[in-house]
Amino acid sequence: MNLKPPSLQPSAIMQRAIALAQAGVSQSGCKAELPIAAILLNAEGEVLAQAHNGVEAAQNPLAHAEMLALAQALKTRRYLEDCTLAVTLEPCAMCMAALCHARVGKVIFGAYDPKSGGTVSGARVPQHMHFKPQILGGIEEDACRTLLQSFFQTLRNPA
């Protein structure tokens, strides 16, 4: 028996993040912006913050979706232990370290990033941190991977 409200189901959260990533590319007006989005929910499933990548639009290498969502949420509280962050691509080392420092209770990601991931790939940041969030990867992985592959295909072969 599953007692989680529908809004806290990992697949449902990731579908919302995918939709945000798709919308973010059109909203940013920047064709080179990666379609990556993050949504931060509290324990009741309410959205505390959400963001899509803004690296290209802001010309800021720190404007990853996770960092932007964290900055929004941390304006009202210091730690996020009861929260879940969902992101369409495995967080990099910078983002994963920030998520650990903010004590985000659970991190859900879609596509694995064997080259630049910092969660279960690459640097594996949580194993070196005092606070270790619960990590759940590969949620809606095919959809997240396809979103990124389509982006790169279009970027390399514009119509």
Image (cartoon, rainbow, N blue to C red):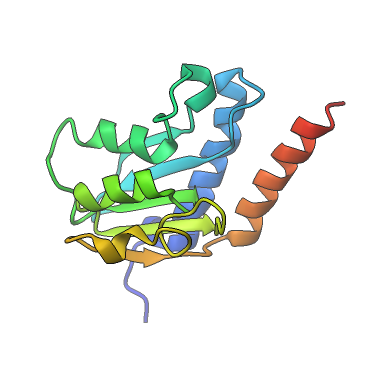
Residue 157, quarter of the rendered image: top right
Residue drawn at x 41%, y 29% as measured from the top left: 63
Residue 22 image point, x, y percent? 60, 36
Rendered view: 156 above or below 14 = above
Q: How many marks?
A: 0
**Farthest residue toward the bottom?**
1
Residue 107 image point, x, y percent? 35, 57
Position of residue 22 in the picture relative to residue 139 (left or right): right
Image quadrant for the C terminus?
top right
Rendered view: 36 above or below 25 = below
Rendered view: 34 above or below 138 = above
**Farthest residue toward the left?**
78
Image quadrant for the N terminus?
bottom left
Residue drawn at x 66%, y 23% as measured from the top left: 31
Residue 34 image point, x, y percent? 59, 35
Residue drawn at x 49%, y 32% as measured from the top left: 53
The residue lying toward the viewer, choosing from 123 and 154, is: 123
| Residue 72 makes an appearance in the image | yes
| Residue 133 makes an appearance in the image | no
Position of residue 131 in the picture relative to residue 56 (left or right): left
Residue drawn at x 22%, y 60% as measured from the top left: 129
Rendered view: 28 above or below 16 = above
The residue lying toward the viewer, choosing from 90 and 20, is: 90
